[in-house]
Image (cartoon, helix red, strand yellow):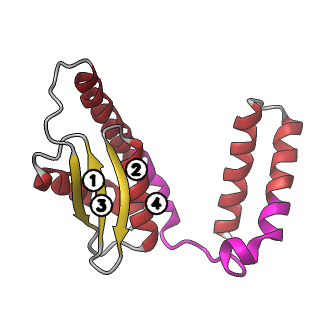
């Protein structure tokens, strides 16, 4: 039931942001629409009745630092791409790097791929479930081990608590 309530609130919030309105009638309609859609499609969305998320409170608390870390990665990537675009920093070694995703769940791998693709200068190209690694294209692949360490650090410090 907790997951359903969380999803209803999130869908209603997205609806309100899409309308750019905090009018109580808009919020009520968005909540009603979210309930109808989520209950009507629960078999497809949740595989039956939604289950509660273990450690939901802990995940919500850890989400803030995780988003802060993701935002900092986006800023760093933007800075590198800006310097490269303005020819202040040479484009010397763009390429592909294989990043292992170790013990991450499917959701954890998806979040990792999404967050790494948000940052300019890095894009998730593919993943290999047999080798348990994702393949990312980076603007500077001169030190692949540093890229792997950065992904590992972000996961261990921030993402694990939100989406293991």
Q: Earlier in the sequence, mark 3 or mark 4?
A: 4
Picture mark count: 4
Q: Earlier in the sequence, mark 2 or mark 3?
A: 2
Residue found at x 36% / y 48%: 123
Q: Cα distance, mark 2 to mark 4?
A: 17 Å
Viewer-side label of 1, 3: 3
The residue to which callout 1 is attached is 154
CA neighbours of label 1 inside 10 A, class few (<14), some (14 to 19), many (20+): some
The reply to whether the C-beta atoms of the residues labelled 2 and 1 are less than 8 Å apart is yes
* Quarter of the view holding residue 84: top left
Rendered view: 24 above or below 37: above
Quadrant in the picture for the N terminus: bottom right
The residue to which callout 3 is attached is 135
Element under label 2? helix
Rendered view: 132 above or below 153: below
Viewer-side label of 2, 4: 2
Q: Earlier in the sequence, mark 2 or mark 4?
A: 4
Q: Earlier in the sequence, mark 1 or mark 3?
A: 3
Rendered view: 77 above or below 116: above
CA neighbours of label 2 inside 10 A, class few (<14), some (14 to 19), many (20+): many
Element under label 1? helix
Residue found at x 65% / y 59%: 6
Rendered view: 47 above or below 8: below
Label number found at residue 125: none
* Quarter of the view holding residue 163: bottom left
Viewer-side label of 1, 4: 1
- The magenta-colored residue range is 35-64
* Left or right: 139 in relation to 160: left
Viewer-side label of 2, 1: 2
């Amino acid at each position: 039931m907790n997951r359903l309530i969380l999803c209803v609130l999130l869908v209603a919030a997205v609806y309100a942001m899409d309308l750019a309105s905090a009018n109580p009638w808009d919020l009520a309609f968005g909540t009603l629409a979210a309930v109808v859609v989520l209950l009507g499609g629960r078999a497809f969305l949740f595989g039956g009745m939604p289950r509660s998320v273990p450690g939901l409170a802990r995940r919500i608390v850890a989400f803030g630092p995780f988003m802060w870390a993701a935002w900092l990665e986006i800023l760093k990537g933007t800075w590198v791409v800006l310097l490269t675009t303005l020819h202040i920093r040479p484009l010397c070694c763009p390429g592909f790097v294989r990043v292992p995703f170790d013990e991450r769940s499917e959701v954890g791998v998806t979040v990792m791929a999404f967050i790494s693709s948000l940052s300019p200068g890095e894009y998730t190209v593919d993943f290999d479930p047999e080798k348990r690694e994702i393949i990312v294209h980076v603007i500077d692949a001169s030190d692949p081990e540093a890229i792997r360490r950065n992904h590992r650090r972000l996961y261990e410090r921030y993402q694990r608590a939100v989406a293991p």
